[in-house]
Image (cartoon, rainbow, N blue to C red):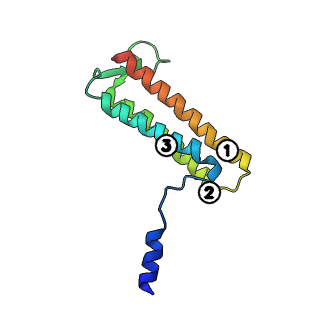
Amino acid sequence: MIDRLRKKSRSKKSRLRLGPKYTATPLKLSVAISAVILVIVIGVQPLIQPVVPLFHSLPGSAQLTPKGWLFLLPALSLLINLIHIGAINLFKMSELVVKLYAWADLILQLILLMITLRNILIVL
């Protein structure tokens, strides 16, 4: 009996379930972009200046923050992913609304990637 259960558990492939099948592509891309943002921020830490302009709407030297503040962008990216994936999995919504959440997540991740690249390219 135990051997039979072990064989069953081994035969099933474990995969990360992000949501329904029809949202797999945008959600997987969103998670991948989030990982890319984190890798970029970690990779440029030794190369950039000690202070970077992160808050462009503030006047003068108030724009400048320590370079550790760049980790705010991957953290925000991860938070957006968690909220959208959680909402998709927890709440019963129509297929259209779920697709909108998934594609909105992807668009927000692309915007955060562009913001990250812009902020880093300014100081390199």
- Give the residue number, with chain letter if any, for mark 1: 99
Q: Percent position (x, y) of residue 73?
A: 44, 33
With respect to residue 19, does 63 lie above or below? Answer: above
- Residue 52 falls in which quadrant of the image? top left
Q: Which mark is residue 11?
A: none
- Residue 45 falls in which quadrant of the image? top left
Q: How far apart are the alpha carbons under marks 2 and 1?
A: 15 Å
Disc nearer the start of the sequence (2/1): 2
With respect to residue 34, does 51 lie above or below? Answer: above
- Total marks shown come to 3
Q: How far apart are the alpha carbons under marks 2 and 3?
A: 18 Å
Task: Please state if 110 lies on the left or on the right of 66 as rendered.
Answer: right
Q: Secondary structure at mark 1?
A: helix
At label 3, the amino acid type is: Val
Q: Which mark is residue 90?
A: 2
Query: Which residue is drawn at the image coordinates 52% and 44% (left, top)?
Result: 28
Q: How far apart are the alpha carbons under marks 1 and 3?
A: 16 Å
Query: Which residue is drawn at the image coordinates 56% and 47% (left, top)?
Result: 83
- Residue count near mark 2 (Cα–Cα under 10 Å), binned few <14, some 14–19, many ≥20: few
Q: Are marks 1 and 3 in contact (CB under 8 Å)?
A: no
Quadrant occupied by the C terminus: top left
At label 1, the amino acid type is: Lys
Disc nearer the start of the sequence (1/3): 3
At label 2, the amino acid type is: Leu
Q: Nearer the viewer, residue 56 or 28?
A: 28
Q: Nearer the viewer, mark 2 or mark 3?
A: 3
Q: Percent position (x, y) of residue 44?
A: 31, 27
Q: Nearer the viewer, mark 2 or mark 1?
A: 1
Q: Nearer the viewer, residue 124 or 69?
A: 124
Q: Secondary structure at mark 3?
A: helix
- Residue 7 falls in which quadrant of the image? bottom left
- Give the residue number, with chain letter if any, for mark 3: 31
